[in-house]
Amino acid sequence: MKTVDELSGAFRAQGLRVTPQRQAIFRLLQGNDEHPTVDSLFELARAQMPTISLKTVYQTVHDLEALGEVALLDVGTGSVRVDPNVEHAHHHMICTRCGKVRDVLVDVGALRIPARERRGFTVDDVEVHFRGVCDECAARPR
Ligand SMILES: [Zn+2]
Ligand SMILES: [Zn+2]
């Protein structure tokens, strides 16, 4: 993900406003590999900046997505997750108990659909979700 200064520049270049609230969200996403929900980003931002609104967080995340700076994922955990790792193609492991989402850098290039199954469909992206139980949940008695 770009730095806070680079993101601020990219926003201004698009005619989007850069406010301290928006920059707080840029900062929270730097190097963030937790795939936070918009609600959890809002909670984190509010701890630093009590005046921030959920609407601002939504708007900023959507503007970041429109600029290609974050990906919004629906991995079946009930809410959209924000992924600032747009530089490296990757897949995800999803814990079905706690909803944790982790990046996995595995090559699924060998995954091909036979022509008779594809029926003329052109595939240009493959996204794999590995579902299971994370180490922390596995160590915790149910
Ligand atoms: Zn878990
Ligand atoms: Zn990811």
Image (cartoon, rainbow, N blue to C red):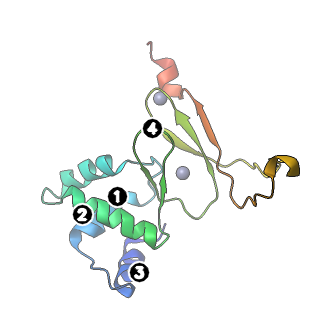
| Relative image position of residue 83 (x, y in whole percent) | 48, 55
Secondary structure of the residue carrying tag 2 is: helix
Query: Is the CB–ligand 2 distance for label 3 below 8 Å?
Result: no
State how far apart marks 4 and 2 are (Cα): 23 Å
Callout 1: SS: helix
Cβ of mark 2 under 8 A from ligand 2: no
Mark 1 is on which residue type? Leu
1 and 2 marks in contact (CB < 8 Å): no
3 or 2: tag closer to the N-terminus: 3
Q: Which mark is residue 10?
A: 3
Residue 104, compared with residue 9, is above or below; it is: above
Residue tagged by mark 4? 77
Instruction: Note whether 80 is above or below 138 in the view shown.
Output: below
Q: Is residue 26 shown to the viewer in this render?
A: no
Q: Secondary structure at mark 4?
A: loop
In-front residue for pair 55/2: 55
Q: For the residues carrying marks 3 and 2, which lies nearer the camera in this image?
A: 2
Residue 142 on image: x %, y %: 43, 13
Horizontal side of 85 relative to 5 (left or right) equals right
